[in-house]
Every structure is written in C-alpha cells, then in structure tokens.
Image: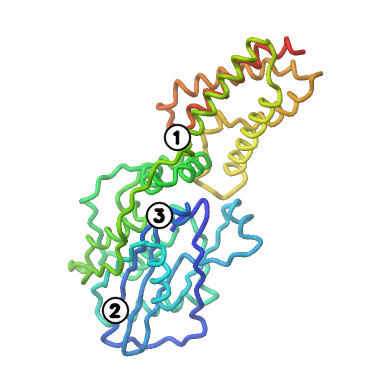
Amino acid sequence: MMKIAIVTILLFTSLSASAQVALSDSAEVSIITCGPYQEEVYSAFGHTAIRIYDPLNGMDLAFNYGTFVFNSAFYLNFLKGDLLYKLGVSSYAPFRDSYISEERFVHEQVLNFNRNQKQEIYNHLHKNAQPENATYRYDYFYNNCSIKVRDLFIELFGQNLKFNNSYLKGGFTIRDLTRMYLQQQPWGELGIEVCLGLPMDKQLSPFEYMFLPDYTERGFDHATLNGAPIVKRKNIVFEPDQKNSAISIFHPAIVFFLFLVGVIFISLKDWRWRKITKWFDVSIFLIIGFIGLLLFALWAFTAHEAAAKNFNLLWAIPFHVIAALILISRKYAYTLAGYFKVVWILSIITLLLWFFIPQKLNVCLIPLVIALGIRAFLISRLLVKDR
C-alpha cells in the first residue's frame, strides 16, 4: 500500500528460479487483505496480496506487489517520485505471520474460479514475477499494491468482472480517505497534508476508493464474474483485539497552540521594549522557508503528481529563507519592513479564506499561521526602529 512517505519493509524471494507448474483441481486463488499498523505512516493503510494454494503440488505462495530493493538510492528516488516496486513472491505462512505478529488483521477471500481460470491467473503472476517483468512504477494513489491486484483480474477477465459499488457513498476525496486511516498518526497526517497539494482533493468514484486495501476487499465482496459472486468464501485468518489510543500531549494541535502562546508572550515583550527578538524570528522564518522550498521542489521538480498546486505555500513561503538571512544583518535588516508587511497581510487573507480554499488545509496549522502573522506584523512595525 501507499507509504509517504515511505514503503513496505518486507522483502521476498524471487520466483525466477522456479518452474511454472500445472495447478491441480484442488488449487485455490485468494485475495489476502492485511490490516493497518499504526506504528508507522507507511503501514497505516494496510496491504493487499494474492495467495496461490495448491496442496497437491505442495504450493502455498504469496504474490506481493509491495516489495522493493532498499539501497542508498532509495531516499533520493523517493524524493523524486521515481519509486520502483516489484512483484515479489514468498511462502504464504511467513508472509501471513509477519502481519499477525504486528497485531494486524488478515482476511482471505477465496475466489470462485474454475481450473482453467486459476491456471491463467497463476501463469500471469508467474510470468510477471520474472526479473525482466517484475518491476513497476509505484504511485501512492493510482498504482499501488491494492490497485495492481484489482487491475490484474480486470486485465484477465475484462467485462465479465463487474464491481457493484452502489453500497458505497461517492464523492470522498483522496484527502478524506487518507485522513480516516491516519487518525492515530496526527503528525504523519500533517506531514502528508503539508507536502501534498490540490490533487489530494480530487473527488473519487467508489471504484477509485480501491487504492485502499479495505476498499479492494469490500469491492471484491460485491463483485461478480459472469454473473456469479466472485468470492466463494471468506476466511478471517486473524482479527486482533480493538485498542483505544489516547491523545498525546504532542498532538500537532496542542504543540502549535502552545507555540502560539509562546509567540504572543515574546511579542508582547518585544512590543513593550520596541525591539524584536531577532534570533527567534530568524529561526522561525528560516525553518518555514525551508519547508516552503521543499514544497515548491516537490511540485516543480519531481514526479509527485499529488504534490502539485500546493496552497500551503501561502504560509510556507520559500522567500522566508532569504528574508531570515537578511534579518541577521543589522545593516540591511530594515529593508525587510515592506516584505513582512506583505507577509502579515497574506497571513490574514489565508486565515479568512481557510475553509474556502479549494485545497483542504489542516486545521492544526491555524495557530502556526496566526503566530507567523503576529511576528511578521511586529517585524514590519519595529524593524526600522531597530536599525
């Protein structure tokens, strides 16, 4: 599944050395859905794989589109949006047990295929697991492990496979759906929402919800092949106990509110003494400026389509880096008064339009934007006096 951030850490052996076999009448093809794991952002959305089980041939394999080779170039490729994943193959038992060990649910949908159809699926997977075919370009929302599984069956069975999504409410956006899965990871949610832009707010059809493993599972629960239900039976392999998570004091909303309180305190002191706390402002605007540079780079210089048209650049302004460096200089700092006047006016406009901007901005950021506006206002008024 999609990881921002971020990717699966399971590496599986290749099928390249194994010979293609003729499946027996006892063979089964299943979709395996694994639940979220809230310790990491990349695992918060779950996972989807395909199981081929043939007891007469001694075969029990998991075909997994979520594998990759971790090396020194991985992080660079991740930043560029050039993520190459592979169809990996492993024994099913260790694959299953790795998810159970993390208290993640494991559901199996045994699919209703005849022998020829099972053989066709196995042949297709075997061929695509070969080294020359296994690699594909990963996309968080449009070409991930869950979508690859769905599209494999669409490719093989075409119009004979029909998904009935009438039971689902349409109109959710990618952002809406990802927020549902990141409620226990507020910092991960914030990081994703800051780095990704307006494409996250695209309204999806229920069919497109299947970029998430849960929705792929439900999609096949309501799918038919040649008019008959495609799921023959469903096995709940493992279901963990439900755990309630407490809200941490380090939640972004609390941290940014406390930051705002601190900014107000420092600003009142600065106003009283008619002099800015320069080290404080240099630190703040340098950090925010670098965040802005990252957002602009993700938009302009990478293949991350979801990072385009990012309205967070209204407060994370890349020019803050230059302004912060100039602010260090006592000789030239006064020239920034006009710049920071624009900044505090833009902060007010952003706050007034917060809930009307096409991109849904994270509400936890509101205290941060208020704090930036306060400091920008103070700098614009006191900078000349501090000359």
Q: Is residue 63 left or right of residue 196?
A: left
Q: Can residue 168 be seen at all in this image of the molecule?
A: yes
Q: Which structural element holds mark 3?
A: loop
Residue named by callout 3: 45
Q: Amino acid at mark 3?
A: Phe
Establish if 387 lies above or below 136: above
Q: Give whichever of discs 3 and 1 has the lower sequence position.
A: 3
The residue singled out by tag 2 in the image is 28
In the picture, measured across the screen, residue 242 lies left or right of residue 307, that is left
Instruction: Bin the neighbour count of mark 2 within 10 Å (Cα to Cα): few under 14, some 14-19, many 20 and up.
Output: many
Single out the mark in the foreground, 2 or 1. Answer: 1
The furthest residue to the right: 331
Q: Secondary structure at mark 1?
A: loop
Closer to the chain start, of discs 2 and 1, is 2
| Structural distance between the alpha carbons of marks 3 and 1 | 20 Å
Q: Amino acid at mark 1?
A: Asn
Q: Residues within 10 Å of mark 3 (few under 14, many from 20)?
A: many
Q: Residues within 10 Å of mark 1 (few under 14, many from 20)?
A: some
Residue 294 position (above or below residue 368): below
The answer to whether the residue labelled 2 contacts the one labelled 3, judged by CB atoms less than 8 Å apart, is no
User: Where does residue 192 sit, x and y in percent of width and height?
Assistant: 49, 44
Relative image position of residue 332 (x, y in whole percent): 79, 19
Where is residue 254 shown, x and y percent of the image? 47, 33
Which residue is denoted by mark 1 in the rendering? 362
